[in-house]
Amino acid sequence: SKSSVDVSIQVASVNTFDEKRDGHLKSPDFFDAETYPVITFKSTAVEPKGDGDVRVTGNLTIRDVTKSITFDAEFNG
């Protein structure tokens, strides 16, 4: 419960192993890497669920739009 997550992802680093798809994802149709070069996530809560599993809640920002999301994760140390 004292854990936290703070992640920044450079949109230009997106790699799906398909050049055409990567170009489209980086284009203004999706992430718009030129205008919004970074996707961020900062946790607001990390709750243990047992057996190394946790539920993470936080703020995800893509293209200057921030939304609260919650997802399950496995803690690996």
Image (cartoon, rainbow, N blue to C red):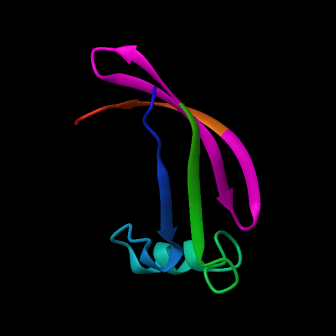
Q: Nearer the viewer, residue 40 or 23?
A: 40
Farthest-out residue, left: 77
The image position of residue 31, as x and y in percent, is: 64, 70
The residue depicted at 70 percent of the width and 73 percent of the height is 29
The residue depicted at 47 percent of the width and 46 percent of the height is 5
The quarter of the image holding the C terminus is top left
Query: In the figure, 37 relative to 3: above or below?
Result: below
The image position of residue 74, as x and y in percent, is: 32, 30
The image position of residue 44, as x and y in percent, is: 61, 38
Q: Is residue 2 left or right of residue 41?
A: left
Dominant secondary structure of the magenta stretch? strand
Q: How many marks?
A: 0
Farthest-out residue, right: 65
The range drawn in magenta is 46-68
The residue depicted at 64 percent of the width and 51 percent of the height is 60
The residue depicted at 57 percent of the width and 77 percent of the height is 26
Farthest-out residue, bottom: 34
Q: Can residue 60 be found in the magenta stretch?
A: yes
Farthest-out residue, top: 50
Q: In this view, does 68 lie to the left or right of 41?
A: right
Q: Nearer the viewer, residue 45 or 53?
A: 45
Q: Can residue 67 be found in the magenta stretch?
A: yes
Query: Residue 50 sits in which quadrant?
Result: top left
Q: Nearer the viewer, residue 65 or 46?
A: 46
